[in-house]
C-alpha cells in the first residue's frame, strides 16, 4: 500500500497534491491532482519534482489489486492505451 504526498517545497509555493491510496500489488501509472492556490500562479518545470510516494509495509498478508487499471502505462488508460 502506498500514498502520494506533496513535497514541502511545492506546498510552500502555494500548491497542493490530492491523490488516493495506492492499493497493494498495483502496477501501473500513478496520478495526482495539482491544485495551485498561489494567486500569482506558478511555473512547473519539465521533470520537476512535485510529490513523493510513501510505501507502507502491510502487517498482514493482503490480496493484491487486480482491477482494470493493473499494468496501465498511461494516466486514464488500460495496458498503455492512451485515453483522449
Image (cartoon, helix red, strand yellow):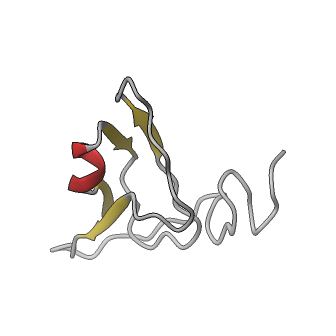
Which residue lies at the image location 52% right of the left edge and 59% below the top edge?
45
Displayed quadrant of residue 57: bottom left
Question: Which quadrant is the C terminus positioned in?
Answer: top right
Q: Is residue 53 above or below residue 10?
A: below
Q: Is residue 13 above or below residue 25?
A: above
Question: Which quadrant is the N terminus positioned in?
Answer: bottom left
Displayed quadrant of residue 17: top left
**Left or right side of 40 for 13:** left
Residue 20 versus residue 45: which sits nearer the camera?
45
Can see residue 80? yes
User: Residue extending furthest left?
Assistant: 59
Residue 53 versus residue 65: which sits nearer the camera?
53
User: Residue extending furthest top?
Assistant: 39
Q: Give residue 7's position: percent from left, percent from top.
A: 27, 57
Displayed quadrant of residue 79: bottom right
User: Residue extending furthest front?
Assistant: 40
Residue 4 versus residue 38: which sits nearer the camera?
38
Can see residue 1? no
**Left or right side of 31 for 76:** right
Amino acid at each position: 500500500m502506498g500514498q502520494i504526498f506533496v513535497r514541502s517545497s511545492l506546498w510552500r509555493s502555494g500548491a497542493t497534491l490530492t491523490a488516493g491510496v495506492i492499493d497493494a500489488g498495483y502496477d501501473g501509472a500513478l496520478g495526482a491532482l495539482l491544485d495551485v492556490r498561489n494567486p500569482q500562479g506558478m511555473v512547473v518545470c519539465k521533470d520537476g519534482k512535485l510529490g513523493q510516494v510513501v510505501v507502507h509495509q502491510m502487517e498482514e498478508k493482503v490480496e493484491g489489486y487486480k482491477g482494470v487499471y493493473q499494468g496501465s502505462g498511461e494516466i486514464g488508460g488500460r495496458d498503455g492505451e492512451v485515453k483522449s
